[in-house]
Image (cartoon, helix red, strand yellow):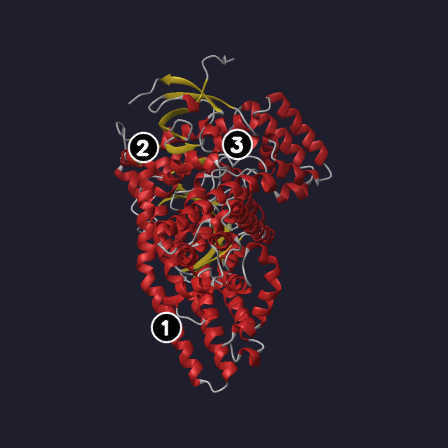
Amino acid sequence: MIGGRDLVPLSFLPPGAKGVVVRLVGGRGLVAKLSAMGISPMTEIEVLHSYAGGPVLVMVRGARVALGRGVAMKVLVRPTRVGGW
Amino acid sequence: MVTVALVGNPNVGKTEMFNRLTGLRQHVANWPGVTVEKKEGFFKHRGKRVDVIDLPGIYSLTAHAIDELIARNYIVEEKPDVVVDIVDSTNLERNLYLTLLLLELGANVIVALNMWDVAKARGIRINVEELSKALGVPVVPTVAKTGEGIDKLKDMIIEGIKISPKPPNYGDDIEGAISVIVERVHKDEELANKYPPRWIAIKLLEGDDEVIRRVEESEYGDEIIRLAEEFRKKFGDDLDVLLAERRYEIISSILQECVQEAMGEIKTFSDMLDHVFLHKWLGIPIFLALLYAVFQFTFAVSAPFSDAIDLAFSWAGSAAGSAIGNEKLASFIADGVFGGLGAVLVFVPPIFLLFFSLGILEYSGYLSRAAFVMDRFMYKIGLHGRSFIPMIIGFGCNIPGIMAARSIENEADRVLTVMINPLMSCSARLPVYVLLAGVIFGGGYKAGAAVFSMYVLGIALAITMALLLRRVLFGGKPSPFILELPKYMIPDLKSVVIYMWERGKLFVKKAGTVIFLVVILVWFLSTHPWAATNGGEHIENSYIATFGRMMEGVFRPLGWNWQAAVALFFGFLAKEAVVGTFGTLLGVEEGGLVDALRSAGWFTPISGLAYMAFVLIYFPCVATLGVMLREIRAKYVVVTVLYTLALAFLVACTIIGIGHILGMG
């Protein structure tokens, strides 16, 4: 299927970058919560703010969702636009 | 009578809708066995009474989160006549996800398209009839803030609804599995009547622990579960993710039919504000500045009111005291009853004002930004971004600080935040620090440094205890930080006032009783035996003094006499009472207290410093304790009392020990 090489954890994307969610890793509770909030495979996602070593704010399905560093590491995306304002 | 449950994502205006429907005819309790708020109210419409239950704000109906479980159990078991699903019209894509789950659950759903005005202003055009047809349920546009569409919603609620929900089609592969399981579930008619069979099938495919447990009770349980397990294996383990994906596909196709969105809207006002409020460097300073403003507002505005209440009650106390012939009764009324009432009511102005300010921050959408900004730092000390605000408020007063922890969803995070809050040096401790620093250092920079060091000590201990208690009590890391940031909005005044009123009322009712009773108990202990103390004039002869002398042995190694022990006992009432007790014991007014206490020679610099630290740590005051009992389980309150006591001794001994080593004893 989709190779792991072009996949990047969400937390590594800079502000302004866009990507498509490919895989969620982590416990079932976390995965369920993420997908309910619209962060499920095939979803387009845009990084609005990202603090080094801190949380990430993304725009997904029309909502702004803040994800802690740990959570953002578990969302693997295929980047479609490199960021930078 | 009709029962209606309100359900919806957070930040869709559900609270506003609840307030709009019920006005002030509402009350707040907890759901049985948990500390999740349960709000109930009612309204009358066309002569019919409608009871309204506000379910927690949720995104889905899994068994993973307590609030989701509460909502779904309520709908499945209590079977409310109507479930009003409040959705944000400006974000149907995400909001309809919960709608689909509610339909699966077989709820009698009415969809309220809330924030209709905002959607219209943004050029989002929703075909209400088409949407209603596509979902198979009534749909009504509403604006909870202004009341638009509410009458129509009320009409729909009392008319009773006939819904013909269209079950979403999950695709042939999954639908095949569902129908096989449904068939098997129908073997047990009792089970099939209790829960919608299709819902059971889907939940089993998702591997929902709670539903599995229920099905296990059925005589066909093993068979049904084994069947579901086989399907799960066939689809791979991510069936719940796959189902979520399919639901979003279904939503996309519905939206394509029913919604036209104006193109070209790139950056909204919220995004612009976020560039400032969430700025890498400016975010934290802005947050601290706002917090400082809240503090100043709260404590500056409330101080005269608190003083007035204090004054009024001491006046009423002495007036009643002199009017009553019986001395004992007079003392009881004056110092016990009025003293007790005063002790509760002086907290009312700051608490109401603080929650008014916090309500504004919450409903404007800023408070969740603050959590985002602080998360990086808080995560490092094992807490949640949301824990920061309660801690800061604790510097003013621990009571509202602890109550502010309610906004933390995760139980462990919330309990931890509450348990370390007493270590934040509240404003009541300041007079004690100032007095003792003056006594041992005689004012000047040394005294200032001593006072400041108490605040730093409190923070350092709070961080240490947060890390330690997390390890010992809960284990693991802080719950994953996932938080939707709402759009910025002008806060709805009615909702802010209700927010303030609910929390203020709770304080007066629950914490108030505890505070009041303890004040009366201490009145008794300090004025009895009545003859020996001459009606409370000679505290040194009272039960409390006896108790202080008994405790002297414990405190002697720390260099404190029985008077200091008695003062600590009164400090349990309110930490600032330590100052007053020294005054009473030395027989001087507050003005001459520093000199009197210094010439009494009760404290050396080291034993005084240890005493200051002890006052900081040793016990949450009775008011704080009352609120804690209300907010967290009793066993955690006991742990808090024990750890603060132990920590106080440990820190005081350490200070004395270091002093000895340095030869400053």
Residue B205 or residue B284, whichever sits in front:
B284
Q: Quadrant of residue B316?
A: bottom left
Query: Do labels 3 and 1 touch, CB within 8 Å?
Result: no
Do tag 2 and tag 3 residues touch (Cβ < 8 Å)?
Answer: no
Q: Callout 1, which amino acid?
A: Ala
Q: Which residue is mark 3?
A: A30
Residue topped by disc 2: B281
Q: Are both tags, 3 and 1, on one chain?
A: no
Which amino acid lies under the numbered mark 3 shown in the image of this protein? Leu
Measured in 3D between alpha carbons, the distance from the residue under mark 3 to the one under mark 1, in whole angstroms, is 54 Å
| Circle nearer the N terminus (1, 2) | 2
> Which tag is nearer the camera, tag 3 or tag 1?
1
Identify the residue position indicated by label 1 in the image. B312
The residue at the point 33 percent across, 23 percent down is: A16
Judge the density around disc 2: few (<14), some (14-19), many (≥20) Cα neighbours within 10 Å. Answer: few
Q: Nearer the viewer, residue B495 or B616?
A: B616
Label 3 secondary element: helix
Q: Are marks 1 and 2 on the same chain?
A: yes
Q: Is residue B126 visible?
A: no
How far is mark 1 from mark 2, CA to CA?
Answer: 48 Å
**Callout 3: residue from which chain?**
A
- Chain letter of disc 2? B
In the rendering, at what x and y percent does residue B252 appear?
41, 28
| Chain letter for mark 1 | B
Residue positioned 35% across, 21% down in the render = A17
How many numbered markers are drawn? Answer: 3
* Mark 2 → mark 3, Cα distance in angstroms: 30 Å
